[in-house]
Image (spheres, rainbow, N blue to C red):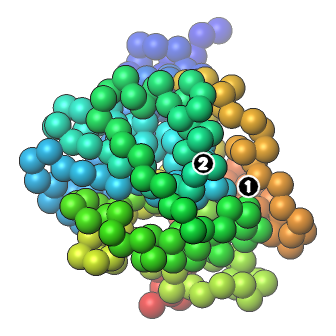
Amino acid sequence: MRVLCTTCGKRGAFYYRQSSGEKLCPFCLEESLENHVKHSFSKKVKLGKSPVIMTYIPIERILEGFLLAYMLSKIEKKFGGTVSIMSSRRVLNVIKGGKLGEYLERNENVRYSVLEKIIEVVECYTIKSLENALKNIEENLWLIEGAQAVLLPYTLTDLNEAFLEHVILGVGDLKVLKMEGRLISGVPLILPYARVDRVDVMALSYILKFTELLDAELIFPKTACEASKIIKDLVIQATLKHPELTHTMLKSVEFFSE
């Protein structure tokens, strides 16, 4: 029996969104995530004409970062905007050296900025990945000159992982979880996926065939930290069985990181 998309009621659904109970077709899932990206700007920055949006892609979040850059390039093409991707040479080579880059370059509004002096080792803990991302941006302020916003591709899942890593394992500084909205050299920092489960991002990346263009190890980086794996499993189980808890934890993040 064909199940119709909850949103449009016309196309066949392929994805069940645990957090809302919606059954979504590929088009409506993509539109939903694009709306999250668009709305993330509304309260934090007023974009001018032909804006430059900087996206930093950490090595731990290549797929999420690429999808964010892809959606931004589509959105900003309508407004004459430019998407500037900032990352290590290794990450940019992965994107530019294969078919992934073709998806971006067809919109003719993407440019790349290489961070030369950064550590390219995959970080075990999500909270440390967040801290490193912030540090790398702050140490390369010249790259964000002229940008109207800096975006990071961390999801609600990531923020929950980082929160539990600190509370349970004592890793990192909770203040980093309040990074969204802060100004870096006058430029606002935005996390468009802050209320999006990582599984939503993975589902859309799969249907767009982006997952086929990346090695599995780049999508799911292997680390030697057993403790971090336990935290990740806890968050995955919460997302699948009790999705409402993931949003409750986010409120805890906002409260405890004051």
- Residue 68 at what x, y percent from top left? 45, 44
Q: Residue at x 39, y 58 (%)?
A: 151
Q: Nearer the viewer, residue 14 or 198?
A: 198
Expressed as whole percent of the image width and height from the top left, the position of residue 231 reads 78, 68
Name the one closer to the observer, 144 or 123. Answer: 144
Q: Secondary structure at mark 2?
A: helix
Query: Is disc 2 surrounded by few (<14), some (14 to 19) or many (20+) residues within 10 Å?
Result: many
- Residue at 77% over, 52% down: 221
113 vs 48, left or right, is right
Which quarter of the figure is the N terminus placed in? top right
Residue drawn where x is 51% and y is 86% of the image: 175
Q: Three-letter amino acid code at disc 2?
A: Val
Judging by the rendered image, the residue that carries numbered circle 1 is 236
- Decide if residue 34 is on the left or right side of residue 16: left
Residue 133: x and y, percent?
A: 53, 69
Does residue 160 appear left or right of residue 183 in this picture? right
Residue 82, compared with residue 213, is above or below; it is below
Q: Disc 1 marks which amino acid? A: Ile
Mark sitting on residue 91: 2
Image quadrant assignment for residue 124: bottom right
Residue at (54, 30) in percent of width and height:
100
Task: Quadrant for residue 41, please give it.
Answer: bottom left
Residue farthest toward the top in the current orientation of the protein:
1
Considering depth in this image, is 234 or 206 the residue closer to the camera? 206
| Residue 220, horizontal then vertical, whole percent | 75, 48
